[in-house]
Amino acid sequence: MTYGFLGLGIMGTAMASNLVRAGFDVVVWNRTETACSPLCELGARNAPTAADVVDAADITFVMLSDDAALRELWYAEGGVLAGVSAGRGVVNMSTIGDDTSTELSAAVVQLGGRYLEAPVTGTKKPAEDGLLVILGAGDRHLYDAALPAFEVMGKRSVYLGEVGNGARMKLVINMIMGNVMLALAEGMALAERSDLDPGLLLDLVAEGAVANPMFSIKGPMLIDRSYPPSFPLKHMKKDLKLALQLAEKQGQVLPQTAEANETFKRAELAGRGDEDFSAVFEALQ
């Protein structure tokens, strides 16, 4: 079995590295070729185009930032579709809208390929440690074939049925995470303004009903006002927007998420987009 991997950003590099370290045959491509070097040093092979990766691999994993980036990679000369042939599997692990995922799936299937969406929950550290949760939807046989790789990249994978269900589940999860992050930021801001010890606040919250492992990771970042990215703020803002679009299609009101989206938008406009999403704290100062 040969695996391909397209997209070697914060998440993709960690995920592909785990596949190589597990002894799998892995061929990689990235728009910025220098990002391939660390993977090649581990034992991966670098292909000249995305199409070459898809053509060479039984299953190709794709991890990009947003819908626009996926569409560009799919339809470009030398892109994903240029490498698809009968039986080739493409697993999109990016967080995108359900309509986009359905479109990309149809394009792959039309050429005789197989498509699975498999967005992940977890940020940089879980990706490095192989502790992601993988939300599969689409071709069931491709899901089963990809399980050995999923077991290396994640601690759990689930199959959710038809294409779109994985994308929708991921948006709901990230919507909750964004709202929780903003609640922590508001609490820390109010504690500081009230001359309370923010470190003690974190300790006390950890002992109560709203204890959350994310607080122990992100809380110290707020105290230090330092936000090295494990999940860039611009991506959270993108996901909140997609969640609101999904809600509009479903006729579901999300008043809290709408307000959270505006706060993340302010933080991005203030130049915090490439920092960790915990930098939303700065929008409250």
Image (spheres, grey):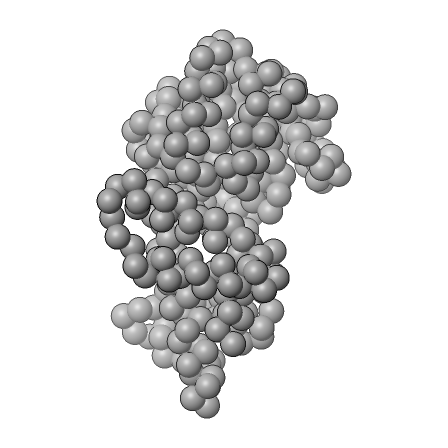
Q: Number of labelled discs?
A: 0
Residue 276, how many percent across, how many down? 55, 59
Res. 152 in view: no
Q: Tell me what residue is drawn at x 41 percent, y 70 percent.
A: 184
Q: Quadrant of residue 194?
A: bottom left
Q: Tell me what residue is drawn at x 44 percent, y 15 percent.
A: 109
Query: Is the residue 62 above or below the residue 203 in the image?
Result: above
Residue 219, how many percent across, how many down? 48, 71
Residue 39, how many percent across, how many down? 68, 36
Asked whether 17 or 118 is in front, the reply is 118
Asked whether 118 or 32 is in front, the reply is 32
Asked whether 130 or 248 is in front, the reply is 248
Res. 172 in view: yes
Query: Is the residue 279 above or below the residue 103 in the image?
Result: below
Query: Is the residue 150 above or below the residue 57 in the image?
Result: below
* Quadrant of the image containing the N terminus: top right
Residue 257, how many percent across, how many down? 35, 57
Q: Tell me what residue is drawn at x 30 percent, y 74 percent.
A: 208
* Residue farthest toward the bottom in the current orientation of the protein: 195
Q: Tell me what residue is drawn at x 35 percent, y 75 percent.
A: 205
Q: Is residue 208 left or right of residue 46?
A: left
